[in-house]
């Protein structure tokens, strides 16, 4: 239990070094990213598709802590959430039998993590039990992904590329009513970036549209609190279903 307390003291101390950032230039970059993919190709229906994809996510954070806080990461759990994106896909080569596409996505991605075993006490300090503290972070997200497809009736594919997320809002559900933890969520950096990779399968045999099911793993390269003495980075999994025309 002491390890979890040390974890939050470290994060609270780290938050004091955080510098405020502005989101306006980065929001412009998100819009520009989709424009790069679609520029000059929207009218070419045979090589460009637009669509939407969304689904569930499980996210957490990875951290490097001092040596005197052993096995702390075992006390950090996954937080469920969801993501939804508008997509634009440009086919760069013909599929004979493999093809390469460039996929741009812009939308919403939910991140977060859980810390179990939080002690709940009454005003007299008597221990009432334990519960789980839950962190939620709402991001506007953009992805620019390379896609390698093997042509078939149900075509498997791989994806890989960078992502950029701009923090919109944050909150913590704290059963212990710790005001310091509520403040901590406001100290996260406005912008984070990383790598997304995964794979899926798609088909255009069922509907007059392309349907895909996709699993992916996203990990941040930049810290959530960039000026902190320890690294704190988002990571997680997504299972998405999409349709494109």
Image: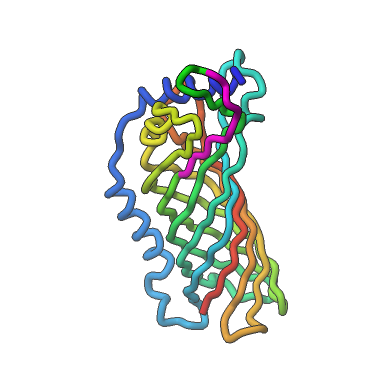
Q: Farthest bottom residue?
A: 208
Image quadrant where residue 96 sits: bottom right
Residue at 66 percent across and 60 percent down: it is: 199
Q: In this view, does 5 lie above or below 104?
A: above
Does 192 appear in magenta?
no
Nearest to the observer: residue 193 or residue 121: 121
Q: Which quarter of the rendered picture does the N terminus lie within? A: top right
Query: Where's residue 155, x and y in %?
Result: 69, 72
- Looking at the rendered structure, the number of numbered marks drawn on it comes to 0
Q: Farthest top residue?
A: 68
Residue at 47 percent across and 39 percent down: it is: 173
Does 133 appear in magenta?
yes
**Main SS of residues in magenta:** strand
Residue at 59 percent across and 62 percent down: it is: 240
Image quadrant where residue 243 sits: bottom right
Q: Is residue 8 above or below residue 104?
A: above
Q: Is residue 224 above or below residue 9?
A: below
Image quadrant where residue 16 sits: top left
Residue at 47 percent across and 62 percent down: it is: 105
Q: Is residue 221 above or below residue 40?
A: above
Residue 165 visible, this angle: yes
Residue 227 visible, this angle: no
Q: What stretch is highlighted in magenta?
A: 126-136
Nearest to the observer: residue 220 or residue 168: 168
Left or right placement of residue 54 versus residue 191 in this view: right
Query: Where's residue 23, x and y in %?
Result: 30, 46
Colour mode? rainbow
Query: Where's residue 225, x and y in %?
Result: 43, 32
Query: Where's residue 147, x and y in %?
Result: 59, 63
């Amino acid at each position: 239990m002491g390890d979890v307390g040390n974890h939050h003291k470290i994060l609270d101390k780290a938050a004091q070094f955080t510098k405020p950032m502005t989101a306006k230039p980065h929001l412009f970059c998100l819009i520009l990213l989709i424009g790069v993919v679609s520029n000059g190709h929207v009218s070419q229906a045979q090589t460009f598709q637009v669509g939407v994809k969304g689904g569930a996510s499980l996210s957490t954070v990875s951290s490097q802590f001092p040596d005197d806080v052993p096995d702390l990461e075992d006390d950090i759990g996954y937080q469920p959430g969801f993501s939804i994106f508008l997509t634009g896909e440009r086919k760069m080569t013909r599929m004979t039998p493999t093809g390469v596409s460039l996929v741009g996505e812009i939308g919403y991605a939910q991140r977060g993590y859980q810390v179990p075993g939080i002690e709940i006490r009454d005003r007299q300090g008597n221990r009432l039990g334990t519960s789980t503290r839950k962190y939620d972070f709402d991001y506007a997200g953009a992805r620019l992904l390379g896609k390698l497809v093997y042509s078939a009736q149900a075509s498997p594919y791989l994806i890989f590329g960078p992502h950029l997320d701009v923090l919109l809002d944050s909150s913590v559900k704290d059963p212990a009513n710790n005001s310091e933890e509520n403040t901590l969520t406001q100290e996260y950096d406005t912008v984070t970036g990383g790598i997304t990779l995964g794979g899926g399968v798609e088909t255009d045999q069922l509907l007059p549209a392309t349907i895909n099911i996709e699993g992916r793993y996203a990990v941040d390269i930049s810290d959530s609190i960039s000026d902190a003495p320890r690294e704190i980075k988002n990571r997680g999994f997504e299972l998405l279903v999409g349709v494109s025309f």
